[in-house]
Image: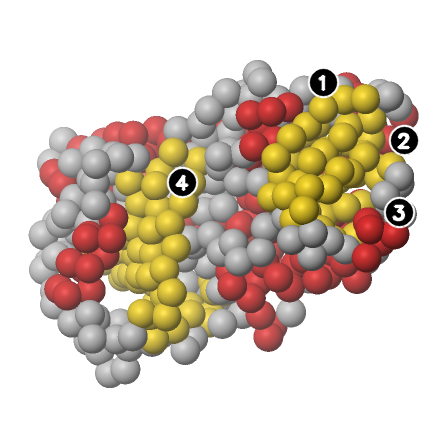
Amino acid sequence: MMARSALQHPEMIYDVAVIGGGPAGATAADYLARAGYSVLLADREGRIKPCGGAIPPRLIRDYAIPDDLLVAKVKGAQIIAPSEKRVDMPIENDGFVAMVDRESFDPWLRARAAQSGAARVSGTFTAYRRDGGCSILTFDTAEGEQHIKTRFVIGADGANSTVARLAVPKAGKPKYVFAYHEIIEAPQASPHYDPLRCDVYYQGQFSPDFYAWIFPHGKTASIGTGTAHKGFLLRGAIGALRQKLALDGYKTIRHEGAPIPLNPLKNWDNGRDVLLAGDAAGVVAPASGEGIYYAMLCGEMAAKAVGEALKTGDARALSSARKGFMKLHGRVFFALGILQGFWYRNDWLRERFVAMCGDADVQKLTWQAYMEKELVRREKLAHVRVMLKDVATLLGFGPKLEKRSG
């Protein structure tokens, strides 16, 4: 159903229409509404993205996420090699990675945007055109076809963005990983499951070029995988993983699948009135597949860019969103892309990658960078040691793993 304000004012011209109510779109709508702009937030009902749900402490602080949305707080990860050898990666100093369930997290973000003043519309975006100096957007809703007028558009409608296809022809297409997960009831007394630990499987049988995961969600757990190989049977791989770990007897509550982009697009705006954000802009980290923090930051930066364009009347401000994002995280995305492209290619390399994850310097830098989303420049000697150990591992002189049971 369309928001009451949209129906009551059919000739209203919004300052901004945000299409897509995931973390990027909801964050953008909330920011702009709090800044005093008239905002329409549009989203499709029943959409839940497949997602492990991990968020770092930096996100919780920056975006004021309440504790009751955190379904679990994990204290570390376990990395499993093709040989079944395992590496533990504990988080030091009482730190934790929080877990959220997108079924409740995304609606909360949309509700916060509405409380800040954003109008809501539930429907599918189908068409875009320009007329009289503003954008005319068409939605299919329960009440039929509806048209909305707006000065600017933020497209946060996912990897297969309709906004990008219709309004940003130079955006290009990112490299995709096709992700699938099953939410199951949390295993009880299982040797293969720890409610305070994320398990990551670097095994070709479960993903030929990415990884499979088991992430705790409190009363439930997410078991998923991803791959860029279109012929790989994702559901079959998860079924085999569950059977292998004796988790196939636990109830499946729901399942989702979707493409996940792994490279920021070269262009996020059309130079006039449309700007992309979140998955639509391609801001999911290669290698890790992490997207929630980057989506929300991208949504905020998109909102600031549109706010500047509204204030100055200069659409060139839209390009500042991508420039700002890439200045902050472009090097990290580039490095992670190289890491995935090299170490995830086959089980021989994956075995050595997992061995490298057992190194204390690797673990320290990995957790520091993940938790605070910044490169740890002060640890120069640790970076040098990691580089040397990386080369040694590739040449076969690196650490050896001891096989352990789950």
> Would you say the residues marked 3 and 1 are in contact, meaning their CB atoms lie under 8 Å apart?
no
Q: Residue 98 location, x and y as percent?
A: 50, 65
Residue 75 figure quarter: bottom left
Q: Amino acid at mark 3?
A: His
User: Which residue is at a point 24% across and 83% down the rendered structure image?
Assistant: 189
Q: Secondary structure at mark 1?
A: loop
Q: Amino acid at mark 1?
A: Gly
Among all residues in the image, which is located at the extreme front? 144
Q: CA distance from mark 2 to mark 1?
A: 16 Å
Residue 252 makes an appearance in the image: yes
Mark linked to residue 65: none
Question: On the image, numbered disc 2 is attached to which residue?
Answer: 311
Q: CA distance from mark 3 to mark 1?
A: 28 Å
Q: Amino acid at mark 2?
A: Lys
Question: On the image, numbered disc 1 is attached to which residue?
Answer: 271
Q: Residue 16 location, x and y as percent?
A: 79, 38
Question: On the image, numbered disc 4 is attached to which residue?
Answer: 259
User: Sequence order check: which comes first, mark 2 or mark 4?
Assistant: 4
Q: Secondary structure at mark 3?
A: loop
Q: Secondary structure at mark 2?
A: helix
Residue 327 figure quarter: top right
User: Sequence order check: which comes first, mark 3 or mark 1?
Assistant: 3
Q: CA distance from mark 4 to mark 3?
A: 36 Å
Callout in the foreground (3, 1): 3
Q: Is residue 399 above or below residue 105?
A: above
Question: On the image, numbered disc 3 is attached to which residue?
Answer: 9
> Would you say the residues marked 2 and 4 are in contact, meaning their CB atoms lie under 8 Å apart?
no
Task: Please give left or right for residue 50 compared with residue 157 in the image.
Answer: left
Q: Residue 172 location, x and y as percent?
A: 50, 20
Q: CA distance from mark 2 to mark 4?
A: 35 Å
Callout in the foreground (4, 3): 3
Q: Is residue 60 above or below residue 312?
A: below
